[in-house]
Amino acid sequence: MKKFMDENFLLQTKTAQDLYHNHAAKMPIFDYHCHINPQEIADDKRYENMTQVWLYGDHYKWRAMRTNGVDEKYCTGDASDWEKFEKWAETVPYTLRNPLYHWTHLELKKFFGIDKVLSPATAKEIWGECNAKLQTPEYSSRNIIRMANVDTICTTDDPIDSLEFHKQIKDDGFEIAVLPAWRPDKAMAVENAESYNEYIDKLADAADSTIKTFSSFIAAIDKRHQFFHDNGCRLSDHGLETFIAEDYTESEIEQIFDKVRGGTDLSSEEILKFKSCMLYEFGIMDHSRGWTQQFHVGALRNNSTRLFNKLGADVGLDSIGDFEIAKPLSKFLDRLDMKNQLAKTVLYNLNPRDNELMGTMIGNFQDGSVPGKMQFGSGWWFLDQKDGMEKQMNALSNLGLLSRFVGMLTDSRSFLSYTRHEYFRRTLCNLLGNDVENGEIPYDMELLGNMVENICFNNAKEYFNF
């Protein structure tokens, strides 16, 4: 019987162990998509206790706690930090076979050197030991990043953001690159005319522009796009239920914009046409400045109206959706490709049924200009666990080139989540190690070691080219 989470955790073969310990483990982290608050890095924030650094904003844990019968006051409510940690400790034993069990103990081990299993019996001891370390300068946000051997971080930022904290981080001379990533979802959110106009007014202020027509709107957006570019951004991201690629004319879009700018809500058809236009315009901007575009698709969000009205978004009320993907995705990519304005693209699906769809779609638009120009992104959200990552890599292996894969990201709000890269790397090495042991690929450690190092870091560093 193997010891739980020893140095060969998830590594079932000698080849896998060699690949991980001699190749994967040493590589820096290129975290090209996360939801870390850049202000916390700018301020080099210190955390009073484990709840602040571990549980605040973590909707994965909140979902598990609710499922375990924990009252909302201990998740997002007004319970004390100790009470919230205690309820999480009570929940952890019930998360066996959920990735949360692995992530929890990887984070305790990696950052705090704790090998004990978290439970009600160990909660006070672990709380005290971790909190004592958090009081020291070695556990500031910047030092946690250093501890994880991070090379680059890309945050998620709205076009109207000032990027003041990114500037501060750079001016401070922090040796790790912390770059903005353009997330213009709100610039497409025309479903509610009132809230959309409020956003456009903020955009106008940020761009120091007057926005009355669609052309002036696009000009303001493009001005902010250039501002992001000037501040190191080379990456965009879109969160979509599915791709939208309706036919439209320029005059239709101008009329639709005039209508919504006048305060009138749009019809379903008008909404789809406008969003189709905006996705295309964003794609053109990204290509014009040499950016990479990312698309996260397939989430059915805010399912519980009761809890959404009480708590808001991003609190664990989302699930996998079953939207049509292939036709609108193909049409969207083809529109840009026909004009030779298709930027490097990373596609992430939330429904695992779409793995092979994505794996084949990227092959349609590879053009030989860049290795792996079209990327099937890593297992995302509900799929960033061992089974989900293996399925994504198997689909990519069967239908594309795993060797050109840009690898893992955290997609997290927590500074302790860098262990997800370790989890991914162990899974990757185990996958390859099993293939070697089964005689399916050659035992060539130079070939395999380079492949692992590239997927873990080098491919992303070269591909994004920041």
Image (tube, grey):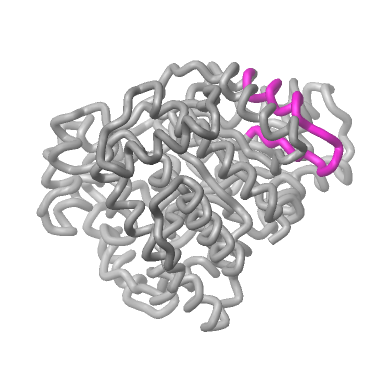
Which residue is depicted at the point 28% across and 52% down?
198
Q: Name the quadrant of the C terminus.
A: bottom right
Asked if 311 appears above or below 156 in the picture, the reply is: above
Q: Which residues are magenta?
A: 357-376
Q: Nearer the viewer, residue 120 or 319?
A: 319
Q: Is residue 62 visible?
A: no
Q: Is residue 394 visible?
A: yes
Residue 286 spot, x, y in % from top left: 63, 49
Asked if 210 appears above or below 58 in the picture, the reply is: below
Residue 167 among magenta residues:
no
Left or right position of 205 against 279: left
Q: Nearer the viewer, residue 461 or 251?
A: 251
Asked if 230 appears above or below 446 in the picture, the reply is: below
Left or right position of 75 against 152: left
Total number of numbered labels? Answer: 0
Which residue is depicted at the point 13% across and 31% down?
306
Left or right position of 355 against 383: right
Residue 281 spot, x, y in % from top left: 57, 42
Which residue is depicted at the point 58% across and 32% down?
389
Q: Nearer the viewer, residue 108 or 320?
A: 320
Q: Nearer the viewer, residue 43 or 292?
A: 292
Asked if 15 appears above or below 173 in the picture, the reply is: above
Quadrant of the image occupied by residue 323? top left
Quadrant of the image occupied by residue 438? top right
Residue 190 spot, x, y in % from top left: 35, 37
